[in-house]
Amino acid sequence: MRRREVLSLLGGAVVSWPHLAKAQYIDRLHEIGVLIPLAETDPDVPPRIANFEQGLRDLGWFKGRNILIHYRFAAQSDQLKVHARELALMQPDLVVAGTSMVASALLQEAATVPIVFVTSINPVAYGFVTALQRPGGNLTGFTNNIPSMGGKWLELLKAVAPNIARVAIMFNPETAPFSASHFIPTVEAAAASIAVQPFVVPVRSPTEIETAFAELGGPAQGLVIIPDTFMARHRALIIEQAARFKVPAIYPARYYAMEGGLMSCGADMLDLYRRTPSYVDRILRGSKPADLPVQAPSKVDLVINLRAAEALGLSVPRIVIARANEVIE
């Protein structure tokens, strides 16, 4: 090969190297972790993942091409720390936390990794952010906090079950401390205006759930389940007990009503999983969590299960049905 041809080839290689390096930087495989506080076999897991991955694709992120996702699932609270440590050891670019409890576990194990929480009732109280508009740290994300929700739950429950005189507020104080402290006062305030007596029912195990329902059963008793990972994990038992003891109940998430509960009203969880990739995208492209404000829910789901209502001997008013996003007949 002639000297001039060799120099020409070398020159072309030198010119192309910066472009190649830039392409590799843009197209490199980014790694993220996702920790969901439910069993992998939970029926609500596939739609959460589907919405999350669709949101990523909409923003140009494709599994195996420019992003690698490490999923972990925790059916029990003690699994959170184990999986959080696993994800931290992988040193991902970012971790997605399904709830506040997950974010807390990740923060202890992966304090230097950006964390995006899908939902948190009160991220300021948990210490995740210093302020909703300016998080100021390494975490940001979304909240399922709707200030008027406590009153809405009681309003709907009383409309569907007008004979109720007392309403239990059930939760696990170990897994929902800030959820309880936020929602209980709002439910109590709303109860005074509709002549319903609220009372708190803390439960920490399936046995305590069963005991609570045995004591709660009766035609004048109602039930409010507040957002709580523990309650979500044991929702099959809760729904079964509510049906067995004829207790009209309202739940905070769609899957309760879809799986046999009377009705649910709360932030659209699948929508939050669909929106979370917007922050994943921005952080992977260089934004800092400290500068990304915590976002409020944009959709509220009201689902009415008419089959459950019929089994309880209740007639759901047409005005309530008209307000529902979904009616199960």
Image (tube, rainbow, N blue to C red):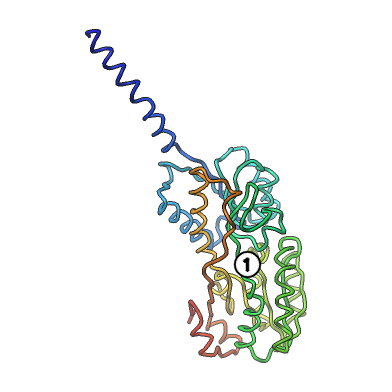
Location of residue 76 in the rendering, given as x and y in whole percent from the top left corner: 67, 55
- Camera-side residue of 90 and 231: 90
Location of residue 74 in the rendering, given as x and y in whole percent from the top left corner: 63, 53
Q: Is residue 10 left or right of residue 129?
A: left
Judging by the rendered image, the residue that carries numbered circle 1 is 145
Residue 300's image quarter? Answer: bottom right
Up-down: is 83 above or below 203?
above
Residue at (51% x, 82% y) in the render? 323
Q: Is residue 242 left or right of residue 47?
A: right
- Camera-side residue of 114 and 12: 12
Task: Say what secondary structure mark 1 lies in.
Answer: loop
Amino acid under label 1? Asn
Location of residue 73 in the rendering, given as x and y in whole percent from the top left corner: 59, 52
Residue 231's image quarter? Answer: bottom right
How many numbered circles does the render carry?
1
Location of residue 32 in the rendering, given as x and y in whole percent from the top left corner: 53, 44
Q: Is residue 228 left or right of residue 61?
A: right
